[in-house]
Image (cartoon, rainbow, N blue to C red):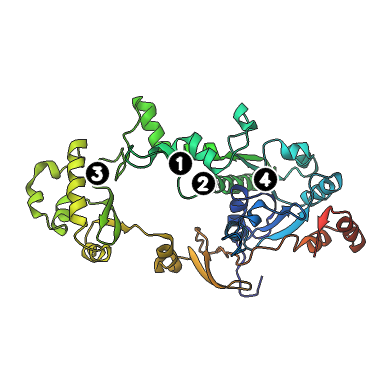
Amino acid sequence: MSETEQPGALDGVTVLEAGLLIQGPQATQLLADLGATVIKIELPGVGDQARAIVAAPGHDRRAPIFEACNRGKRSLALDLRTPDGQDVFRKLAETADVVVSNFMPGTMDGWGVGYADLRAINPRIIFASGSAYGSRSDDGKRRGADLGGQASGGILTRIGDGTVPVVPIGVLIADHIGSQNLANGIMAALLARHRTGRGQEVEVSLFGGQIFAQATELTWTSFTGHLPKPPGQGHALLPLLYGIFPTMDGHIALVGAPDPAELYRVLDRPEMVDEPKFNTRGFPPEVLAELHEIFNVAFATRTRAEWIERFQGTQIRYAPVNDYLEVLDDQGAHDNGYLQRVDHPEYGEVVLPGSPVRLSDTPATPGVVAPKLGEHSREVLAEAGYDNATIDQLAHVGIIAAP
């Protein structure tokens, strides 16, 4: 840390991450951005599976998933499947604050580095795990990934108008929500430890995260005993001026209009102002369907930019429907630090995700570079008290990989 750089909120917190792909690594990415030291434990010669998922096989060997979830971490290539590797991990855990894993439930226990094993040597340790379906049911024994969370949690049935085949959501949403839940649980456990002096176990799953993400819709179904109607252009539980509509050159989201008459005037439909059925706090399904037909025609008469200009100074809530290139170029995203334009030592100037969290006194400091496999093996073990001869021997027999 430079003299001018402020310490992060989690400065002094050491995290051992035995994670792969997204759920575990993205959770610790947030912790790293907030100041924690994250030591990423990876299998020698293989590493996190995300390293092998490249941008364009045969053409672009950069690994976007790995880069997105592992910036600013330290990589220790250590074989946890071996007794010697497990000994090293336990030694590191003696002084660590948090262990994070998103292996299959029971994997870390089988290696002798589960919560019970680590708590015996460090009662302050926080052991956080993310799984696909949770560890307390038979489903927890099944292997899973993001799409399993999407499917089992029900979110895939809430796409479109009910006339198209069920398709995956185009982002790894179950993984991303799972990672945020995992990070939240870890920070809550750190706060509790500050009061009690004791660590604890934290557990989240992709399945559970999808249920929590749909709390309103599932509660409605629980109360009524019915499935919500397909969302169509809006949301089945929001009978409001709310939805996505086509313009001449894209789409725009109408996110609300406190004064419907104001919206009708902006849309050049002043005759609707005096129609009682179009001026209520909530609209019956048949009226909402009529409004959507009117809006589909009205919004298509101008470009997205023209509508945005017309909405300026009104109470109408709106947002352009951006594609990824437009998001990466969004000035507001850069101004807020959600995106950062950086000079990457290998890739040149690139735009990378920043931090979604803004703190006034202990600001987040997003990393820029993800570590090479085993890049920090020697220095991490030296800091843990291993001498050069022992480190060389561990490297010689393949327990660690070190440059």
Separation (CA) of disc 3 from disc 4: 43 Å
Separation (CA) of disc 4 from disc 2: 16 Å
Separation (CA) of disc 2 from disc 1: 8 Å
Please say whether residue 3 is visible from this viewpoint: yes
> Residue at label 1?
213
Q: Determine whether, in the image, residue 231 is placed left or right of residue 50.
A: left
> Residue at label 2?
177
Q: Determine whether, in the image, residue 169 is placed left or right of residue 292.
A: right
Label 3 crowd bin: few (<14), some (14–19), many (20+), radius 10 Å = many
**If you read the primary sequence from the N terminus, does the residue marked by circle 1 or circle 4 appear first?**
4
Between 114 and 292, the one lying in front of the other is 292
Kindly state the secondary structure of the residue where label 3 is placed.
loop
Query: Which of the image's four quarters has the C terminus?
Result: bottom right
The amino acid type of the residue labelled 2 equals Ile
The amino acid type of the residue labelled 3 equals Leu
Between 43 and 378, the one lying in front of the other is 43
> Residue at label 3?
240
**If you read the primary sequence from the N terminus, does the residue marked by circle 4 or circle 2 appear first?**
4
Contact (CB < 8 A) between labels 2 and 3?
no
Q: Determine whether, in the image, residue 343 is placed left or right of residue 124.
A: left
Label drawn at residue 101: 4
Residue pictured at 65% horizontal, 44% vertical: 102
